[in-house]
Amino acid sequence: MKYRLLILAVLFILSTGVGSIPDPSPQYGCETEAYPPLEQFKLPWFQIDLDASPRTRWTEIITTYKDPINDLVDQLLHLLNLVDPSGTILKIIDDVLPTLVLKFPKEYREEIEGISEVSGVKLGRVVVYNIFYELFSVCTSIVAQNSQTGEHFHARNLDFGLFMGWDLENHTWTVSEILRRMEYNVEFVRGGQGVFNMSSFAGYVGTLNGVKAGQFSLSLNERFVLEGGFVGLFEWIVKHEDLYFPTWLARDILTGNYTYQQALDTLSTRAILAPCYYIVSGVGHNEGWIITRGLNESLYPLQLDQEGGRWYLLETNYDHWKKPFILDNRRTPGEKCMNESSADTISKEHIFNVLSSDPVLNQLTVFTTMMNPQTGEMESYRQYCPTCYIW
Ligand SMILES: *[C@@H]1O[C@H](CO)[C@@H](O)[C@H](O)[C@H]1NC(C)=O
Ligand SMILES: *[C@@H]1O[C@H](CO)[C@@H](O)[C@H](O)[C@H]1NC(C)=O
Ligand SMILES: *[C@@H]1O[C@H](CO)[C@@H](O)[C@H](O)[C@H]1NC(C)=O
Ligand SMILES: *[C@@H]1O[C@H](CO)[C@@H](O)[C@H](O)[C@H]1NC(C)=O
Ligand SMILES: *[C@@H]1O[C@H](CO)[C@@H](O)[C@H](O)[C@H]1NC(C)=O
């Protein structure tokens, strides 16, 4: 199960030198005054016009974030060079991946081609850049419903950059640092009308979390298992042409005309290329789910159950029916802090405080987003905690 983590650990040690891993004994405490953060931490807003051609609709965002996009690609190439000094993999990326793009759905293909043109990053490298978000995000998502007001809250921390290089001088994760310079909120519009909101990183076309007013919100957390990931990707290349990136599916569902129930059904059943968790909130009583996805199936879906005492769902990167990985337990501290509130009193402020509590907030956390499926509102803040647990 921890195969990929192991590979990443090797990368980490290669890129840092042995002996620089800090003491893995975080002090758990629940923040009470993290909300609201200072105005300066709010992520900037952009709009994407779905009526514009896919090739040009990202131009403003890519132009704005051209420098960090290039810095990030350089860092990925640096890591690649550590594991493959011969340059064979890079050659495959530059020569073979552009043909893979031809298998992408037309809209995503054209978007990725446009991003390559505007950023000046070679096409194959933009593809890797997009794939790598599917594989390396570690996150925490929370859905809760207030029993007095019926209000739904859906929030997530995005933790990114694990093992992808450690900055010895500044004691930070190199990739996380770059990502903090290129995160933003975006409202997708069509015919002059807002369709949905999401928060993301520049150059990435999939959806890691998004909200559709009056319908639902969703977030995606990575699930580390052997099937899928690189294996799924390889299989897809050679045979299953129809397999789909989990983050494309999330975006399709927010873009299309799906009801909450249709969204749930599709997120549960559509074949995807890598395992993941979809965390979904609707707007009605007990409408909140953790969908644990294998490539073809949904395992032990878990629903909010206020009457049964389950007034919130909290998902990190481990199956809810199993214990979390011992070196990465953000679930228990997160639940402990959630349990300091109650179904009657839960609020956006409380959830933001939970997501700002070490180690739920850690050195990989690059932003926190809070979504309201009733109104479509979204609020995102850059996160940076140099004193928090390393992951
Ligand atoms: C460490 O941070 C400083 C200030 O932000 C920056 O100038 C320097 O380049 C960083 N060091 C590395 C190795 O990136
Ligand atoms: C969206 O779905 C609703 C209900 O399923 C339907 O009434 C409406 O016409 C659909 N809108 C579009 C643009 O397809
Ligand atoms: C998933 O379904 C496809 C066809 O729908 C099948 O070819 C493939 O073997 C299945 N994969 C797994 C892991 O069950
Ligand atoms: C939080 O409360 C729930 C419900 O009472 C309980 O099942 C769970 O064990 C608690 N978690 C922690 C970490 O205290
Ligand atoms: C997106 O979020 C902003 C800020 O919360 C909100 O004003 C806007 O209505 C939302 N857009 C949609 C389409 O829901």
Image (cartoon, rainbow, N blue to C red):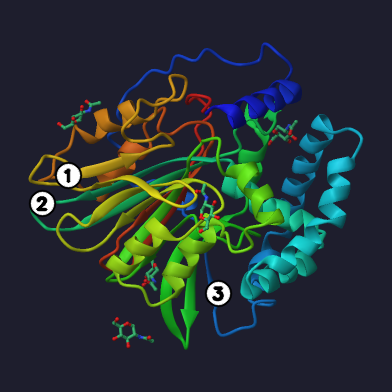
Looking at the image, tell me whether mark 2 or mark 1 is earlier in sequence order.
2
Percent across and percent down for residue 290 are: 32, 47
The quadrant holding residue 130 is: bottom right
The quadrant holding residue 135 is: top right
| Residue at 55% in and 40% down | 227
Element at label 1: loop
According to the picture, the residue beneath numbered tag 2 turns out to be 147
| Residue at 75% in and 22% down | 14
In three-dimensional space, the C-alpha distance between marks 2 and 1, rounded to whole angstroms, equals: 8 Å
Would residue 360 be visible to someone looking at this image? yes
According to the picture, the residue beneath numbered tag 1 turns out to be 311
Q: Amino acid at mark 2?
A: Ser
Would residue 168 be visible to someone looking at this image? no
Q: Nearer the viewer, residue 13 or 95?
A: 95
| Residue at 42% in and 78% down | 194
Displayed-image quarter of ligand 5: bottom left
Percent across and percent down for residue 226 are: 55, 35
Element at label 2: loop
Whether label 1 lies within 8 Å of ligand 4 gets the answer: no
According to the picture, the residue beneath numbered tag 3 turns out to be 48
Looking at the image, tell me whether mark 3 or mark 2 is earlier in sequence order.
3
In three-dimensional space, the C-alpha distance between marks 3 and 2, rounded to whole angstroms, equals: 35 Å
